Image (cartoon, rainbow, N blue to C red):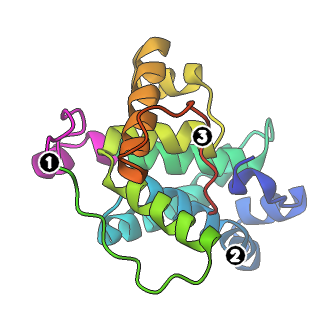
Amino acid sequence: MSQTESHDIPPEVIRAASAGDPAAHAAIYRAYSRPVYTLIRRLVVRPAVADELFQDVFVQVLRSIGDYSGAGSFGGWVRRIAVRKCLMYLRSPWHRAVLWLDAPERDAEPALPDPGPRVDAQAAAQADLERALAALPALSRTIVWLHDVEGYTHEEIARLFGRTVSFSKSQLARAHARLRELLDPQVESWPCTSLSISS
């Protein structure tokens, strides 16, 4: 389950926020700021852009909170806003001018920075996985995160991208293969499984 879905805001706080209560706005921000920022940083690698998107998401959440119908979880509604904002950025001409969303993988191996002293095996594996995920192209990283961590189905991802289910499945398979190469170039084939990344 996504971290945004795991937070439960009482309906009276949502009603108060909808009426403009600053304390209710603050409660919503406190509950969702960390999981929303984590989601944005996983989809958008550049910190300055992620910070801007984070602000945009909360401005939209607080301005349009009256549009929340109560159907489904409030956290899921917040998450949808964050994902849409990120995808709008990733599809934008400004982003594409720097890094093509649909660009084929480069032939050169990305240099993964040395994590420094390793505290324990689990922390080292986590750091390696996060660096490998950051080395993926934006499209691949987004699909891996949405499917494996946020729990989106292939059908939902296809709708978000305006593509087919097979597009989502093939992108995910390629991304998993690339992650395996980045994490252990000596291993030729591992079974495709979902990622386990702490947020």
| Amino acid type, mark 3 | Asp
Task: Categorize mark 3 by other alpha carbons within 10 Å: few (<14), some (14-19), many (20+).
Answer: some
- In terms of image quadrants, where is residue 72? top right
Q: Where in the figure is residue 163, as x and y percent of width and height?
A: 40, 17
- In terms of image quadrants, where is residue 19? bottom right
Cβ atoms under marks 1 and 3 closer than 8 Å: no
Q: Where in the figure is residue 93, as x and y percent of width and height?
A: 16, 43
Which numbered dot is residue 148? 3
- Helix, strand or loop at disc 1? loop
Q: For the residues marked 1 and 2, what is the alpha-carbon distance in whole angstroms?
A: 42 Å
Figure check: 85 above or below 171: below
Mark positioned earlier in the residue sequence (1 or 2): 2
Q: For the residues marked 2 and 3, what is the alpha-carbon distance in whole angstroms?
A: 25 Å
In the displayed structure image, the side of residue 49 where residue 96 appears, left or right: left
Q: Which label sits in the foreground, 1 or 3?
A: 1
- Helix, strand or loop at disc 3? helix
Residue depicted at x 43% and y 41%: 187
Give the residue number, with chain letter if any, for mark 2: 30
Give the residue number, with chain letter if any, for mark 1: 108
Q: Where in the figure is residue 94, as x and y percent of width and height?
A: 16, 50
